[in-house]
Image: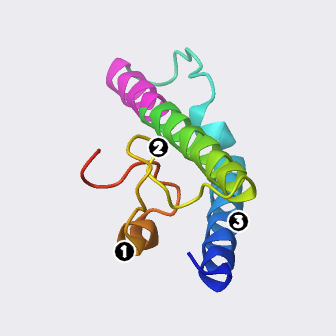
Amino acid sequence: MTPERLSYFRDRLLALEKEIQATLEASKEDSGVVELDTAIGRLSRMNAMQNQQMALELRRRQEQQLQRIANALKRMNQNRYGLCGRCKQPIAEERLEVSPDVVMCVKCA
């Protein structure tokens, strides 16, 4: 991979990281504890709990993606970015365009 393309993917990863961190910060209270308030009905409480669980799952997935981004940046520093973690062959740049934090090529995935 050329240094220009590597720089391009580094910029994409950093922008994606910043975007996810901003989303996590903005959605902190969505995943908070559902208060057992008698003012709301049972269905409203169940709906609030379901929304809380969906927010928690989204948050978990975003945190996992942040970890994959951090690992991709480490691989860049070790000159291993763009190589499949299993077969060590280059990952297609089209695949990296879609998901710059991907670890494996299509064949191994």
Q: Is residue 57 left or right of residue 31?
A: left
Residue beneath the point at 55% across and 46% down: 65
**Residue range of the region highlighted in magenta in the rendering:** 42-53
Q: Is residue 88 left or right of residue 25?
A: left
Camera-near label (3 vs 1) is 1
Report, in whole angstroms, how far the alpha carbon at label 1 lies from the one at label 2: 17 Å
Secondary structure type for disc 2: loop
31 or 59, which lies in front? Answer: 59
Residue 6: percent from left, percent from top: 64, 74
Q: Who comes first in sequence, dot 1 or dot 2?
A: 2
Q: Which residue is the site of mark 2?
A: 85
Q: Is residue 47 left or right of residue 57?
A: left
Residue beneath the point at 75% across and 56% down: 77
Mark 1 Cα shell of 10 Å, populated few (<14), some (14-19), many (≥20): few
Residue furthest left as drawn: 107
Quarter of the view holding residue 31: top right
Q: Which residue is the site of mark 3?
A: 14
Report, in whole angstroms, how far the alpha carbon at label 3 lies from the one at label 1: 19 Å
Mark 3 Cα shell of 10 Å, populated few (<14), some (14-19), many (≥20): some
Q: Which residue is the site of mark 1?
A: 94
